[in-house]
Amino acid sequence: MHSDRVIIEALAVETVIGVYDWERDIQQRLLLDLELATDIRAAAADDDISLTLDYAAISQRIAHFADEQAFALVETFAERLATLLHEEFAIAWLRLTVRKPGAVAAAAAVGVRIEREWS
C-alpha cells in the first residue's frame, strides 16, 4: 500500500439519511473526511493532475452520490460510498469518516469511521 494520502476534510453533502419516518422526507447534512492512498510521485514530477487522485472530481462524485441515494443508516452510506470510490477511481485503500451533525442532542455529531483495502 502507498504511504502517500490525498485528503478531503469536512466535505459537506446533503442526503436523505435516517431511520425515522420524518427523516425520509428531508435532506440532512453529512460531513465526510477521507484519506485515499495513492502514489503522488509521478504527478509531482510532471505537475500533472491526471497522474494523481483528483480531489475536486472525487468531491463532486461524492456530492452526486449523496444527492441520488437514500439510506436509513450512516453505515450503509459509508460502505456503499467506499465501494463506489474504489470502483470508479481505482482507489486501493481508504479511510472514510461520516459524521451526522445534530443526530444526538448532546453530541456535536455522531457517525462511523471505516477503513477498506482492496487488492
Image (cartoon, helix red, strand yellow):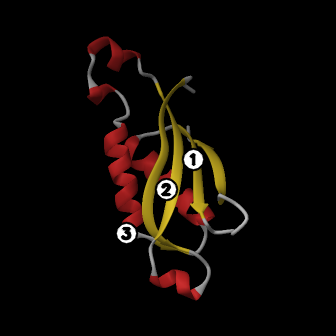
Q: Are marks 1 and 3 in contact (CB under 8 Å)?
A: no
The residue that disc 3 covers is 68
- Please name the amino acid that badge 3 sits on: Glu
Q: Nearer the viewer, residue 26 or 64?
A: 26
In the rendered image, the vertical position of residue 51 relative to residue 87, given as above or below: above
In the rendered image, the vertical position of residue 90 relative to residue 5, given as above or below: below
Residue found at x 39% / y 61%: 65
The residue that disc 1 covers is 96
The spot of residue 107 in percent (x, y) is: 70, 61
Q: Nearer the viewer, residue 9 or 113?
A: 9
Residue found at x 40% / y 54%: 62
The spot of residue 76 in percent (x, y) is: 58, 65
Q: Which residue occupies the extreme right position in the image?
A: 106
Asked which secondary structure carries label 3, the reply is helix
CA neighbours of label 1 inside 10 A, class few (<14), some (14 to 19), many (20+): many
Q: Nearer the viewer, residue 24 or 37?
A: 24
Q: Are marks 1 and 2 in contact (CB under 8 Å)?
A: yes
Q: Quadrant of the C terminus?
A: top right
Separation of marks 3 and 2 at Cα, in angstroms: 12 Å
The residue that disc 2 covers is 81
Residue found at x 57% / y 88%: 21
The spot of residue 75 in percent (x, y) is: 62, 62
- Please name the amino acid that badge 2 sits on: Leu
The spot of residue 36 in percent (x, y) is: 50, 36
**How many numbered callouts?**
3
Closest to the camera, between mark 1 and mark 2, is 1
Asked which secondary structure carries label 2, the reply is helix
Separation of marks 1 and 3 at Cα, in angstroms: 19 Å
Q: Earlier in the sequence, mark 1 or mark 2?
A: 2
Separation of marks 1 and 2 at Cα, in angstroms: 9 Å
Task: Give the left or right position of residue 50, taking residue 111 as reference.
Answer: left
- Please name the amino acid that badge 1 sits on: Leu
